């Protein structure tokens, strides 16, 4: 949900960005978010080593949720997300981040120009914390998926699948036999017999000579599901 006029895209010098829209039409939200990002104890862009583009998307997301909360009294984006994606509720907590977000919001609310946000203090802390926690989990994952790639190096597409796996933020890919001992996923070919010491709980994935986009998609789907499982609280941890 966005508030304010629709940003008009142009290749000319008068290109209107979302940032400019919020600065002009909801300046209190614009300044609150900018001050939050400047004063939070975590330099999120440097800590995560994210690009300017990703950082600006985070800033825009904060504009949106802040406007939602300011106008409606609740972060409707998070409410909808939690109803649609049950696993968002099971993300591992980050108490250091929560404390940093809470302290920064409280500091800003002590300033006269931002006291209008004070009635929604708890909603702001929760929304900001959830957004930043999801970003940190993507770019600095605490639990990575260990993938053992056991494919002949002269196999057609070997370098493609190696590069594809290596470019996933939350994957540790190895081509050594030792990696089979604690691998979460083993990518191999039908012609290779795996040694007895291979982790019996590892998910096997047979790579095909004629692998197409669907085959890559299935591989990514398995990797992502394994990462989700490793990144979320187990039922035993909820009790």
Image: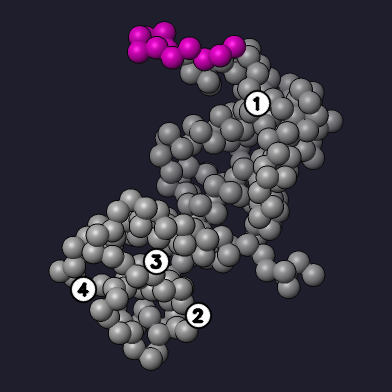
Mark 2, residue position: 201
Numbered disc 4: secondary structure: loop
* Residue 64 image-quadrant placement: top right
Where in the figure is residue 17, as x and y percent of width and height?
48, 18
State which tag comes first along the sequence, 3 or 4.
Answer: 4
Q: Is residue 63 above or below residue 238?
A: above
* Mark closer to the observer (4, 1): 4
What residue is drawn where x is 68% and y is 20%? 28
State which tag comes first along the sequence, 1 or 2.
Answer: 1
Marks 4 and 2, how far apart in space?
23 Å
Q: Is residue 50 above or below residue 66?
A: below
Which stretch appears magenta? 5-15
Of residues 101 and 60, the one nearer the viewer is 60
Mark 3, residue position: 172
Numbered disc 3: secondary structure: strand
Where in the figure is residue 38, as x and y percent of width and height?
57, 34
Considering the whole magenta stretch, tell me its main secondary structure: loop
Q: Report the coloring of the rendering.
A: one colour
Mark 1, residue position: 1
Numbered disc 2: secondary structure: loop
Mark 4, residue position: 152
């Amino acid at each position: 949900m966005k508030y304010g006029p629709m940003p008009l895209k142009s290749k000319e010098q008068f290109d209107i960005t979302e940032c400019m829209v919020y600065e002009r039409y909801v300046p209190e939200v614009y300044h609150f978010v900018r001050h939050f990002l400047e004063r939070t104890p975590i330099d999120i862009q440097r800590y995560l080593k994210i690009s300017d583009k990703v950082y600006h998307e985070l800033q825009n997301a904060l504009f949106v949720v802040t406007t939602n909360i300011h106008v409606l009294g609740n972060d409707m984006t998070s409410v909808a997300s939690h109803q649609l994606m049950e696993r968002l509720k099971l993300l591992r907590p980050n108490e250091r981040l929560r404390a940093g977000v809470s302290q920064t919001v409280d500091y800003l609310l002590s300033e006269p120009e931002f006291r209008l946000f004070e009635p929604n203090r708890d909603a702001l802390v929760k929304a900001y914390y959830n957004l930043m926690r999801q970003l940190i989990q993507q770019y600095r994952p605490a639990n990575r998926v260990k993938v053992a790639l056991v494919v002949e190096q002269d196999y057609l597409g070997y370098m493609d699948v190696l590069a594809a796996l290596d470019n996933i933020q939350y994957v540790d890919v190895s081509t050594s036999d030792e990696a089979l001992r604690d691998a979460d996923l083993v990518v191999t070919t039908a012609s290779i017999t795996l040694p007895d010491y291979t982790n019996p709980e590892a998910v096997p994935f047979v790579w095909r000579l004629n692998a197409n986009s669907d085959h890559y998609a299935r591989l990514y789907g398995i990797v992502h599901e394994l990462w989700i499982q490793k990144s979320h609280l187990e039922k035993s941890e909820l009790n």
